[in-house]
Amino acid sequence: MSPEISIIDYGLGNIKSIRKGLEEVGATTVVTENKKDLNQSDGIVIPGVGAFEDGMKEIESLKYTIYDNIESGKPILGICLGMQMFLTKSQEGKQTIKGLDLIRGEAKKLPDKVKVPHIGWNSINLNKEHWIFNEIPGKAYFYFVHSYYSDLKYKKDILSTTDYGIRFPSAISRKNVTGLQFHPEKSGENGLKILENYVKYVKR
Amino acid sequence: MLTKRIIPCLDVKLDQEGGTVVKGVEFKDLNKAGDPVELAKKYNKQGADEIVFLDITASSEGRENMKEVIRETSDQVFIPFTVGGGISSIEDIKKTLRAGSDKVSINTAAVENPELINKASEIFGSQCIVVAIDAKRRKEEEKDKEIVELEDGTKGWYEIAIYGGKKYTGKDAIKWAKKAEEMGAGEILLTSIDRDGTKQGYDNSLTSRISEEVNIPVIASGGAGKPEHIYEGFTKGKADACLAASIFHYDEYSIPELKRYLEKKGINVRY
């Protein structure tokens, strides 16, 4: 049976792409903001379009449901803003905003010596082995769109880095929580492979 | 390292078949080039870095963009998908994103109501707001205009057109690009009306000037007829991405061919 993945619906932006991507690699999906759906699914994806503060506001009511599901061992995947919301806090917005604090770190603005947002295809440098990168070639390109990057407290949480004005973590993980700064659903074949790895891991 | 992007563009016109990809010369004389869904599928497979879908008559016909065609086309692509044409409100943006686009490109509405960029970037994030500028070269001297040194050594300025090139505004394109960035645009899609469909190369005087003036990515558009033009768009025009239509639609050059050529010339591209 194909695993069921909940995609948290923030009510903003394009969720269709991630849904389509997960379905392409064999998952069934439910786009939801319902606690029961999250509890019943095999995996949870937090997609990433929008601003940090709005995103946190949108998922505030689901915060403890997310914590409970992580505690139970369910694989959680955060993409772009979804990944940054895993952090302790963010500098995006007028004052510092608290995140979910699942991975220690802070979202900071990319340096302005480069064009911001960082938009386009960039390569990753693997930092350590991880199931999310199974069968992904060493210098694979992925699609990035972001103005903030994740400054992590612990280097061991970093799976890969990418260079753009600064060397920043492009994939992070702590236990069953995995975050991707790039958009696998928009990264062609390699991106679909990443989603397939996630779906396989959920099904394991 | 960040790569330079190659973006095939689908100019789509609403007709009895739903939507047809067309290509004109200087925004006129539209010729049919194919079915948007099929072309999008092909470009996704060939390794395009992004696809732009422009509903080119939505604004001038005063209608909403063609959601059904957008939906079907977006189903075929696993790379970034930008939709433009006829988007004039927050509600339009929301609906277009929901139909499967990742970014929206706003042209006429942004010029008429710049506040829309501000609001939209606050709600959806700058990354999904592309401001499209259609610029026409003007040779006569005018006060309060940003003067650009042209490739032949003469001087000129650039006027913005809206409604798909049907209405001239008297406004300066370079000033507008800077203002659009300030208002929260995440990218600029810069089309030269003079070069559109002519296959004479991008207007690199215009592109390089705007690329230097703003700190957001600039997509060069209008005039690509051969691989050299795209190479020059990146080098002379200092563009972050190059958009082209006819050279891909009519299979004059495939995307992998073009990328191999660019890589040989030292441009960093994605395979």
Image (cartoon, helix red, strand yellow):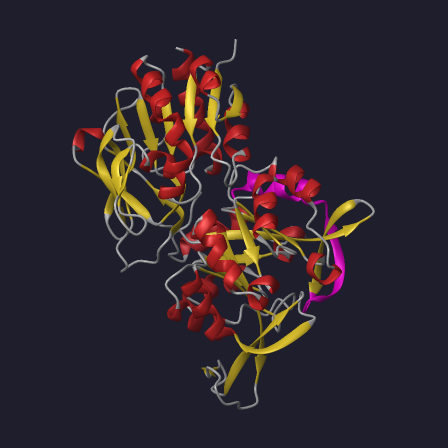
The structure residue drawn at horizontal position 54% and vertical position 23%, both measured from the top left corner, is A23
The structure residue drawn at horizontal position 66% and vertical position 51%, both measured from the top left corner, is B249
User: Does B53 sit left or right of A110 as displayed?
Assistant: right
* Image location of residue A93, percent across then percent down: 32, 50
* Image location of residue A30, percent across then percent down: 53, 22
Q: Which residues are magenta?
A: B25-47
* Image location of residue A132, percent across then percent down: 35, 25
Q: Is residue A182 visible?
A: no
* Image location of residue B219, percent across then percent down: 49, 60
Q: Residue B27: say if magenta.
A: yes
Say how many tags the image has.
0
The answer to which image quadrant residue B43 occupies is top right
Looking at this rendering, what residue extends furthest in the top direction?
A1
The structure residue drawn at horizontal position 54% and vertical position 78%, both measured from the top left corner, is B158
User: Does B202 sit left or right of B36 as displayed?
Assistant: left
Front one among A18 and B23: A18
Q: Is residue A129 visible?
A: yes
